[in-house]
Image (spheres, coloured by chain):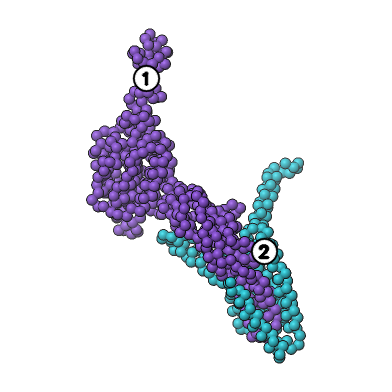
Chain colours: A purple, B cyan
Amino acid sequence: MPDHPPGAPAPATDLSLSWSVSPHARRLLTLAVAALAIAIGTGRPEFAGLAAPAVLLLAAGRRARPAQVQVTAGLTASRLVEGERAAVTLAVRGADGYSVHLVLRPAFAIVPLPGPGGQRPGHAAGRDAALPFTVRRWGRRRTGSAEIIVRDRWRLAEGRAVYGLPGLDCYPRPAVQQTRVVLSRLPQRLGEHTARAAGEGAEFGGVREYVPGDRQRSINWPATTRRGRLQVNTFQAERSQDVIILVDAAWDEGEPGDTVVDRALRGAAGAARAYLAARDRVGFISYRSQARWLVPGLGQRHYYRIAEAMLAVERDRSYDPGFARLPRAALPPGALILVFSPLADPRLVETLRDLRQRGFAVLIVDVQAGDPWLGRGRTARLAHRLWRMEHQAIRFSLRELGVPVVQWDGQQSLDLPLAPFARRALVTRR
Amino acid sequence: MIAGQPPGQAGRDGWRASWRAGWRVWWRHSTARLVLTAALLGAACLVWAATPPGSAGPAGPALVTLGACCLAGSAARLALAGVPRPDTAGYPGPLTRLAAWALDLLRRLPWAEAALLAVLALEALHPARPWHTALLGVALTGYLFAVHLAESSSGRGESAALLRGQAPVLAAGLGLLVLAAGSALLPGAGTGPAGAGLRAAAAVAALLACALAAPV
C-alpha cells in the first residue's frame, strides 16, 4: 500500500486495468444473441434485423484499450478530528480518450460525503478528482481503497483497477469546555490563574499602608486622601497548575461511536485543550490494563502528543490484574487529577482512593450515561439493580473520601457538570 | 402587491413560482426522467410484444408476468442506484441486514437482460408479423439506451454527448432492421436456399457479436 507523508508529492503508481464488458454491452449482446438465435431457430429474418443495431454498435465501438494507467493519490489531511472533513485526491494519467470514473470504497468508520455540484457520495468523474469524506470514530484508520473505472467512448467496455489508500489518524473530538477547575494551592510558577497569595498579577487584592520600597505607581490616591496616610494597592499572584488527565479505558460499553471510552476520550481531549489554553502543564494517563502516561507539558504540540497517546489506547490489549497504584513519576506533587471513568473497574477505584490518601485533589467525571446493556428478563433486571447499587456504593465511598464525582453524558458541554467546582478554587486537604 | 389582489396572494404566487422553478431544476439535473423513460419504454415493449393477447399460446401469461417483474426490478435498481448500502459492520439489526441483502440482490441480478429475453420470447411466440417486430426492435434499442443513460449519465447534456457519436451507427442498424423487416414480407422468406443463407448469416453475426463484445 502506498504511504507517504501528507503534503509531499506522491509518486505515480502504474496500475494494470482489468477490462470487462460493461453492463450496457452485456445488454446489447443479450439482445443480439437472443434475436439472432430466434432468427436461426424460426427462420424469421425480421429478428436478424432486430439484432442489427446492437451488433453494429458492438463492432463499431471496439478500439485498442490501454493496459495500464498511472495513478497519483493522496489525502488532504492525514490527521484529523472526528467529524472533520478531508478528501482523497486522485489523478489518473494514461487514459486519454477514455472517460474516468472514481469510486471510494471506504473502510470502517469512513463516511463518503457528497462532492461539489451534487456529486454522489464516494463517486467522482474526471481524471483529477477529489472524493470528500469524514471519519465517524477516532483511531488509527484505514481509509479504504479507490476504484478507478475507465470506460471507452461508447461505454461498451470497462477497465477497472483498485488503488489502496494510505491510512490516517483520527483524534477524538474534544468536548466543549470553557471554564477550568483551579486548585486553591498552586505551585510557584508563573501562569494565568489567580492565586490566593499576593504577587505581581493583574487581579486587585486590596489596599495597605505604604512601606518604603513600594512602587510609586501603586499608590492608591483616593484611599490615601481618605485615610490621611499613603496607601498602596496590592495584587494577587498569577500561577499555573499541573493537571493530570486520567482516562479509564478498562471497561467499554455502548453503541460504536458513543461508547464509554469514546466519551471519556472526548472529555479528556476537551479538558486537555482547555487547560493547555490557560498555560497549565497537562499530563495524560490512560488506564486500560496497565497505566501508560505522558509527563506534563505545555503548548499546542503537547496537545498532539496527548492525542497520539489517546490513539494508543485502542491498541492496548494486555491485562494486569494486580495493578492498583499509579507510579510517582506520572504524578507531579500538588497536581489536579481529572479522571474520566465509568467507575466500573474495582482496581481503578482502589487506585483513586490511594491517590486521595496521597493528598492529590481528585475530581471524577463519570462517563457512564445510563445503565449498561445486560439483556432482558428477570435475571437482567436483577443484574441491573445489583449494578446500580454497586455503582452508587462506589460513588458514595469516593465522596466520603472527599473525591467529588460528577456525571457527564458526553453530549453537553463539560462546563455544566464542572460548574460547581469552576466557580471557586478547589480546596485540597489531606 | 398588485392593486385589487387579496393580501397574501402575492406571497402564495411567489412560493408557487419558486417551487416550480426548484422542481424544474431538479427535473433537469436528476436522472429521474431517464429512469421514468426507461420504465415507460420497457412497459411499452412488453405490452407491444404481448398484443394481441391470447395469440402467444399457453406460455404467454407466464412470460408477461416474468417480463413485468424484471422490468419492475430494472426500474427499482435504477431508481435506487444512488442509495448507499446500509452499514453492516458491527452487529446490525435484522431490518438493516434485510435492507442490505435486498439492495445487493437488486443490484446483482440482470433484470434488464431477463426482461429483454422475456419480451423477445413473447414476440417469437406470436405468428410472423415483420413490421410489428421491427417497431419492437426500435423500442427495445431505445429501452436499452434509456437504461444505459439512466445508470451512467450524471449531468445535463451528457446524455446528448453520449448519443451523438453513436447516432450514425444506430441509424445504419435501424436501416438494416427496416431492410430485414421488408425482406421478411417477401414470399418464401426464411425457407429454401434463401432461408438457409439467412440462418448461416445470423449464426455468423451472433458469433461476431460475442467476439466483438469480449474485452481486449
Q: For this view, does B36 lie left or right of residue A339?
A: right
The numbered disc on residue A285 is none
Q: Residue furthest bottom?
A: B192
Total label count? Answer: 2
Mark 1 against mark 2, which lies toward the viewer? 2
Q: Quadrant of residue A20?
A: bottom right
Q: Which amino acid lies under the numbered mark 2 shown in the image of this protein?
A: Leu
> Which is nearer the eye, A175 or B159?
B159
Q: Is A128 or A347 nearer to us in this picture? A: A128
Is disc 1 surrounded by few (<14), some (14 to 19) or many (20+) residues within 10 Å? many
Where does the C terminus of chain A fall, quadrant-wise? top left
**Circle 1 — which element?**
strand
Of residues A169 and B27, the one nearer the viewer is: A169
Question: Splitting the image into 4 quarters, where does residue B56 fall?
Answer: bottom right
Q: Residue at x 29, y 37 (%)?
A: A332
Label 2 chain ID: B
Which of the numbered marks, if any, corresponds to residue A234?
A: 1
Protein chain holding label 1: A
Count residues near mark 2 (Cα–Cα under 10 Å), then give few for <14, some for 14-19, many for 20+.
some
Image quarter in which the N terminus of chain A is found: bottom left
Tell which of A419 and B208 is nearer to you.
B208
Residue A267 position, x and y percent, is: 39, 44
Q: Position of residue A303 (x, y in %)?
A: 40, 42
Residue shown at the point (46%, 48%) measured from the top left = A80
**Height in image: A28 above or below A127?**
below
Q: Amino acid at mark 1?
A: Thr
Residue A256 rendering spot, x and y as whole percentages = 41, 54
Q: Which residue is mark 2?
A: B162
